[in-house]
Structures are given as C-alpha cells and as structure tokens.
Amino acid sequence: MVDTDSAPGDPERDREPDIAMWGASGSGKTAFLAALSIALNKARDAGWRLIGENPVSRAELAKLRTTLLHARTFPAPTEALTHYNWLIIGPAEAPRRRWWWPWKTHTVKAPKIKLDFLDLRGDLYAESESNIDKKALVDSLVKSRGLIYMFDPDREGRVGDAFKHLDAALHEVAGRMLVDDVYEDGKLPHYIAVCVTKYDDPRVLRAAMEAGYAERDPSDELRIPRVPEDRVRDFFRLLCRDAQDHNAEMILDLIDAFFHKDRIRYFVTSAVGLFIDEDLGRFDPDDSLNVIDNPNGGLTIRGAVRPMNVMEPVIWLGRMLRPGAMRSGRWEA
Ligand SMILES: Nc1nc2c(ncn2[C@@H]2O[C@H](COP(=O)(O)OP(=O)(O)O)[C@@H](O)[C@H]2O)c(=O)[nH]1
Ligand SMILES: [Mg+2]
C-alpha cells in the first residue's frame, strides 16, 4: 500500500530520490543521456523535463543534445572522470483537499529526482578504470536508490567483461551497505533498470528478430519491431548466453541475488532508434540501420533520432522512488 507511514527509524524516510547510472565504458551511457533529453522534449505531454543543476551540467546537456540532433553523430568519448548533476522534474499532481481542512486545497509538489551521472573515462574498452574512478562510482551507487545499469550486447560479444565488472561493483556496494543491520533482508534497497543498449545495432536487432522476440504491433503506424515487456528478461538471457564470456549467463543470477525481485525491470533501449524511410513511412527490415560510417572514422546518424525506451526506465525509477510511491515495484499510472 501507500508508503507514507513508514516507521520513524526507516532509513529510506525523507530521503531525496537519487538515480545513478552505471555500465562499462562504451556501453552507451553518454549517448543514452543525450537521447534522454530529446525523448523527454518529444513527449512534452508526459510532463517530465531534464535540467542541469549547475552551469557545467547545463552546458553539457545542451552540447549532448546538439551533437545528436544537429551534428548527427555520437558524443565523443569522455576524456576525464566527469560528474554531472541533473534533475528530472515530473508533472505536479492535481491539488488535494485534506479532510481536516477541506476548505483549503493543498498543492502537491512536482516530483524531483536527482540524476547523478558519473561519466568514467571513455577510453573505449579500457581494461580497468583507476581506483579513484572506482571509488567515486561506488560512492555514487551507495548514495543512490535507483540504478540504471547499461548492458551492451555488442561489447559482450567481443570483450565479454560485464559479469566481472558487475560482480566487483555489487560486492563493493554490498560491502558498504549490508554489513550492518540497516537492511535486514540482506538485499540492496535500490530499484534497478537493466537496460540492453544499442537495439538498433544489426547484431542485436537480428538476434531479436531471428529468435522471435521482436514483435510488430499492427496499431503502430511505423511497424517498429519491439521486444514486449514480459519477454525482455528472456531476451536479455539469450544475449548473455551468446556473449563471449560464459560467465555472462550468471549476470541474471547476480542481479537476482542482490536486488528485490519486484524492484528489477529490464528494458531494450536505443539512443537513436531504427531507421525509417520517410517516403515509405514504416520500418523496413532490409533498411533498418540508422547509423553509417563517416569519412572521419566515426558514425553519422542517417534519419530521425527516435530514442527507444530511454525515457521509460528513468520515469519508472522516478515513479518508484517518489515519496509515497508504492513499494511493490508495480508501474503506477
Ligand atoms: N548503434 C548504436 N550505437 C550506439 C548507441 N549508443 C551508443 N552507441 C555507440 O557506442 C559508442 C559509445 O557510446 P557512449 O555513449 O560514449 O558510451 P559510454 O562510454 O558508456 O558513455 C558511441 O560512440 C556509439 O558509436 C545506440 O543507441 N545505437
Ligand atoms: Mg561516456
């Protein structure tokens, strides 16, 4: 039920909801954030906005958006450990009346969620980040209550180190949070959105289509193949199975071991979305690539940027972490 009457000693009471993002370098974190502001802008009616809390974060947000929308390419790999503080502001609810004060309406504040994003050095596929970077990352995970965990199936197919990274990070966080008796059930208190990135990448899309995970909704004008919500976890398992590292299959077990089952959700995401030929007006499986190689050795985005499931994980976490939200992990309308 509604969690407004948590016990006075409850460590979760009155805390500011805070989301941290994490994933191997090159897994698509920066691109995801660039796409997040675009996705939130496109869906204005949903009423959620992303803003920078300080001048540096604001400037970076504008830069990321411009790179994707106007330069039509991906943000450059991060040079140094950078800490961004962004705020996601949700729609204010309708004013409420209280029974003991029925003549006065009580304005319900717009939900605010901190998005604490630590962009680690982006020297792609670096073997290990420095100790300072690691400490900052673990600090940010410990402080947060919502996690966005990025899993890049393409990288897993080649490098295969997601299990090693996840295992190490979760043990560090658990070592800091679970040794005393605050969380008596032995699980971390976070909600976690596990995001499979780069769905538009032909290897990922093909895997989804060939294994029958991608379905086209006849009511969707663009006929974009999507993995239905209730099958994403199984699709994730398939990708882990196909990974370079056989341990990858244990990623699901690892997540289950550390988090409450009803606080885990899986999403299939893409920062740029699939290519849609505007003349044809719908998805064509033989022409779905939205990125092409450019002469500078980078990638150019071909068509419109249509972020896929970029806003959804963040809003889900926002709703779950909102003071008074249902703690069951169920999507609350
Ligand atoms: N096809 C495709 N490639 C992506 C996507 N997101 C990221 N990438 C690629 O992955 C690279 C690394 O992404 P980046 O966001 O910098 O990763 P980070 O190190 O986790 O911040 C980018 O330069 C792109 O080439 C996506 O949604 N689709
Ligand atoms: Mg980055």
Image (spheres, rainbow, N blue to C red):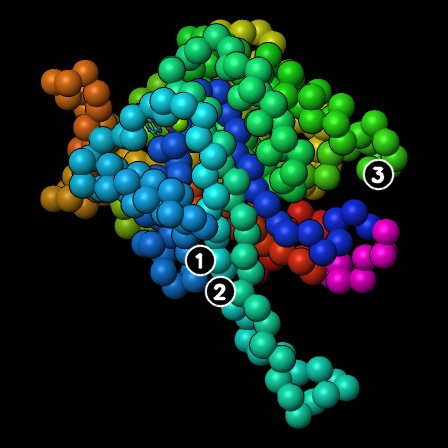
Position of residue 163 relative to residue 54, above or below, is: above
Q: Which residue is mark 2?
A: 91
Residues under numbered marks 1 and 2 in contact, where contact means CB atoms less than 8 Å apart: yes
Give SS at disc 2: loop
Q: Quadrant of residue 96?
A: bottom right
Of pointers 2 and 3, the one earlier in the residue sequence: 2
Residue sitting at 86 percent across and 51 percent down? 9
Q: Give the magenta range.
A: 1-9
Q: Amino acid at mark 1?
A: Trp
Q: Is residue 214 left or right of residue 165?
A: left
Q: Quadrant of residue 75?
A: top left
How dense is the environment of label 3, judged by Cα within 10 Å: few (below 14), some, or many (20 and up)?
few
Rendered-image quadrant of the N terminus? bottom right
How dense is the environment of label 2, judged by Cα within 10 Å: few (below 14), some, or many (20 and up)?
some
Nearer the viewer's eye, disc 3 or disc 1? Answer: 3
Horizontal and vertical percent position of residue 76: 29, 26
Q: Amino acid at mark 2?
A: Pro
Residue sitting at 36 percent across and 56 percent down? 43
Give SS at disc 1: loop
The foreground one among 11 and 82 is 82
Q: Which residue is mark 3?
A: 182
**Mark number, residue 122:** none
Q: Amino acid at mark 3?
A: Val
How dense is the environment of label 1, judged by Cα within 10 Å: few (below 14), some, or many (20 and up)?
many
Position of residue 216 relative to residue 24, above or below, is: below
The answer to if 5 sits in the magenta stretch is yes
Answer yes or no: disc 1 within 8 Å of ligand 1. no
Give SS at disc 3: loop
Q: Is residue 302 left or right of residue 180?
A: left
Rendered-image quadrant of the C terminus? bottom right
Q: Which residue is mark 1?
A: 48
